Amino acid sequence: MDIIEKINSEFKTSVLPLSLINSVLEDKSEDAKKALLKRACQKGDLVRVRNGLYLIGEKKRKTSFSSFQIANLISEPSYISLESALSYYGLIPEAVYTTTSVTTKNSLELKTPVGLFSFSYLKTDYFNFGFYSYKSGSDRILIATPLKALIDYIVLMKKHYKTVEDIEEDLRFDFDEFKNYKSFVIKEKINEMLSIYKSYRIQVILKDIRKRL
């Protein structure tokens, strides 16, 4: 049984951190592991996304994968936010070709064989809330709530919105759809954010959003 067959028989994922591969090859020496990985990549059985992260090649892939899943693993800790999350929720009409995340590590732009990824630094006080995990196949993906994705965008893009209309015009933002996410977009969550974000420009737009709910 080759490395890919072994992985497919033991795991239901196509996205492979090096730690998972090493667990499958635990009986091999370090040199043997490196040789197997190199050979698998040369044959196209594995695709190297970046150091320490691989994807099963298309011909041997048994399960689907998402760019969100890969993004979560490229930089840890991180979660999907900004334009990717806003597009995922159907709040902006434009197609998003770069998978966007926030992280407490340094900002990073990365071109990989499976797409473009962008990670924006967000300080810890603003990072540690407003996201959740959902299941994609056998994997779990971390993503910002609709409200947090919007506020992350305003914070990081240094937007000076004063009204909801400003957001709608600049982003072609669907505020009616935004309000439909009733488990996430509620006055209590905005009140919590108002206690965290002390910036005047963030306070102004949070209060206008709250007024319209």
Image (cartoon, rainbow, N blue to C red):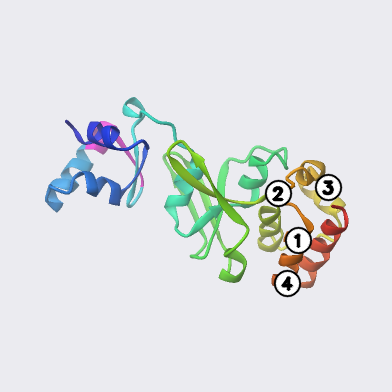
Task: Give the residue pinned by disc 3.
Answer: 169
Q: Which amino acid does label 3 sit on?
A: Glu
Q: In this view, does 188 lie to the left or right of 35?
A: right
Residue, disc 2: 183
* x 16%, y 30%: residue: 1
Which residue lies at the image location 66% right of the left edge and 62% below the top edge?
156
Name which of mark 3 and mark 1 comes first in the sequence.
3
> Is 144 situated left or right of 190 in this image?
left
Mark 1 to mark 4 CA distance (whole Å): 11 Å
For mark 1, what is the residue?
188
Residue 188 pos. (x, y %): 76, 61
Horizontal side, residue 138 vs residue 68: left or right: left
The mark nearer the N terminus, 2 or 3, is 3
Residue type highlighted by circle 2: Ser
Query: Distance of mark 3 from mark 1, alpha carbons?
Result: 26 Å
Q: Which label is found at residue 195?
A: 4
Residue toward you, 21 or 133: 133
Q: Magenta region: which residues?
A: 40-49
157 part of magenta stretch: no
- Please count the marks in the image: 4
Q: Nearer the viewer, mark 4 or mark 3?
A: 4
Q: Tell me the tag on residue 90.
A: none
Q: Is mark 2 on a helix, strand or loop?
A: loop
Q: Which amino acid does label 1 sit on?
A: Glu
Q: How crowded is mark 4: few (under 14 residues within 10 Å), some or many (20 or more)?
A: few
Secondary element at tag 4: helix
Q: Do the residues labelled 2 and 3 touch (CB within 8 Å)?
A: no
**Sequence order check: which comes first, mark 2 or mark 4?**
2
Residue type of the residue flagged with mark 4 = Ser
